[in-house]
Image: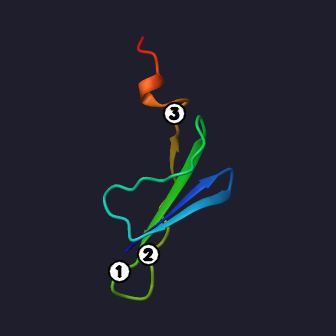
């Protein structure tokens, strides 16, 4: 099992459990920087340490509405 925490400005926005290789996170705001932390829970009751944050930005608008330069 994998636990995923999504933060914006130190506020926890989303917690996802039992994710696999890809996971869609709903409800994010456009043009916003987010930090993601991940840890696993294997067969033992003790989870792994949290990863270092991975940061990403959401796009300003939907890809279909973006201009190509």
Q: Residue at x 51, y 33 (%)?
A: 59
Q: Are marks 1 and 3 in contact (CB under 8 Å)?
A: no
Pointer 1: what residue?
42
Q: Badge 3 local density, few (<14 within 10 Å), some, or many (20+)? A: few
**Tag nearer the camera, 2 or 3:** 3
Q: Badge 1 local density, few (<14 within 10 Å), some, or many (20+)? A: few
| Among the two numbered marks 2 and 1 on one chain, the one whose residue lies closer to the N terminus | 1
Eyeballing the image, is 47 above or below 32?
A: below
| Among the two numbered marks 1 and 3 on one chain, the one whose residue lies closer to the N terminus | 1
Query: Farthest residue in the front direction?
Result: 64
Q: Badge 2 local density, few (<14 within 10 Å), some, or many (20+)? A: some
Front residue of 62/15: it is: 62
Q: Are marks 2 and 3 in contact (CB under 8 Å)?
A: no
Q: Are marks 2 and 1 in contact (CB under 8 Å)?
A: yes
Instruction: State the SS at label 3.
Output: loop
Instruction: State the SS at label 2.
Output: loop
**Tag nearer the camera, 1 or 3:** 3
Eyeballing the image, is 54 above or below 62?
A: below
**Horizontal side, residue 43 vs residue 34: left or right:** left
**Horizontal side, residue 39 vs residue 11: left or right:** left
Residue 7 picture location, percent across and down: 60, 55
Q: Residue at x 48, y 53 (%)?
A: 25
Pointer 3: what residue?
59
Query: Farthest residue in the left direction?
Result: 21
Q: CA distance from mark 1 to mark 3?
A: 34 Å
Pointer 2: what residue?
48
Eyeballing the image, is 24 above or below 68?
A: below
Q: Quadrant of residue 14?
A: bottom right
Instruction: Report the label total.
Output: 3
Residue 3 picture location, percent across and down: 46, 69
Residue 63 picture location, percent across and down: 43, 29
Q: CA distance from mark 2 to mark 3?
A: 31 Å
């Amino acid at each position: 099992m994998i636990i995923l925490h999504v933060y914006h400005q130190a506020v926890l926005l989303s917690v996802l459990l039992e994710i696999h290789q890809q996971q869609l996170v709903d409800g994010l705001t456009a043009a916003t920087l987010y930090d993601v932390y991940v840890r696993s829970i294997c067969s033992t009751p003790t989870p792994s340490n949290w990863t270092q944050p991975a940061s990403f930005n959401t796009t300003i608008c939907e890809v279909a509405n973006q201009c190509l330069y």
